[in-house]
Amino acid sequence: MFSTTGNIVYVGLGSNLDNPVHQVEQALRTLETLPATELKTHSTLYRSTPLGQQNQPDYINAVAVLHTELRPLALLDELQVIENQQGRVRKVRWGPRTLDLDMLLYDQKQLQSPRLTLPHLGLYERAFVLYPLYECAPDLVLPNGQRVCDLIRSSEGLCWREVHHLK
């Protein structure tokens, strides 16, 4: 395992096809093998109702915390390789998928490019991201100055689709 105090990155994981719990657990194991990267911790698993099309299975979600020396786009490339290895097919936005790995935060960087937006566009509104993020970093202050714990305490502006903690 690569030991680094490099950049702190939060990655959202989601799956609702082909044994979603296994898909997320496999992705967590694979994150441990990324070059110049260490998986520091991850949340437990959560079940949430889907965004977009409602005629699809519920999602299993989690958040992983990485320390990495990889630059944002290099890490994005690695995450997309993992998605592809686990059968990810990009057909419909917010459609069913075997695996979705979203870079939520990369330190406090703000970036907007054709391939990557940091922080992730839905970060501030999605309970299925904020709950596991809070579990990993309860004192985290987001790039806009908001604290994750304050976003969770207030339902104002959040996408409060049903989210259940799996035990």
Image (cartoon, rainbow, N blue to C red):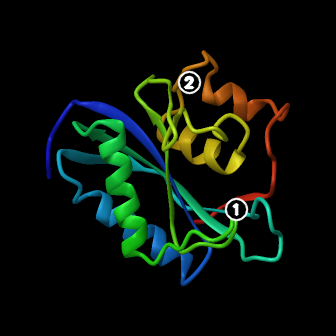
> Quarter-wise, where is residue 126 in the image?
top right
Q: Residues within 10 Å of mark 2 (few under 14, many from 20)?
A: some
Say the numbered circle drawn on residue 15: none
**How far apart are the two marked residues, 2 and 1, measured between alpha carbons?**
24 Å
Whether 72 is drawn above or below 62: the answer is above
157 relative position to 100: left or right? right
Please indicate whether residue 130 sits to the left or right of residue 10 in the image. Answer: right
Q: Residue at x 31, y 58 (%)?
A: 31
Looking at the image, the residue that sits furthest to the top is 145
Residue 110's spot in the image, x, y percent?
Answer: 50, 24
Question: Which residue occupies the foreground of this view, 114 or 84?
Answer: 114
- Residue 167 location in percent, x, y? 58, 66
Task: From the top left corner, tell me how far across and down residue 52 is, in percent.
Answer: 79, 61
- Residue drawn at x 79%, y 38% as measured from the top left: 158
Above or below, comparing residue 130 to residue 45 in the picture: above
139 or 35: nearer the viewer: 35
Label 2 vs 1, first from the N-terminus: 1
- The mark lying in front, picked from 2 and 1, is 1
Disc 2 secondary structure class: loop
Choose top left, top right, bottom left or bottom right for residue 15: bottom right
Residue nearer the viewer, 74 or 149:
74
> Residue 117: x percent and y percent?
53, 36
Amino acid type, residue under disc 2 in the picture? Leu
Q: Is residue 30 left or right of residue 69?
A: right
Instruction: Determine which residue is flagged by label 2.
Output: 142
Instruction: Give, as a three-letter code, the residue at label 1.
Output: Trp
Q: Secondary structure at mark 1?
A: loop
Q: Residue at x 61, y 23 (%)?
A: 147
Q: Which residue is mark 1?
A: 94
138 sits left or right of 131 in the view? left
Residue at image coords 41%, 75%: 86
How many dots with numbers? Answer: 2
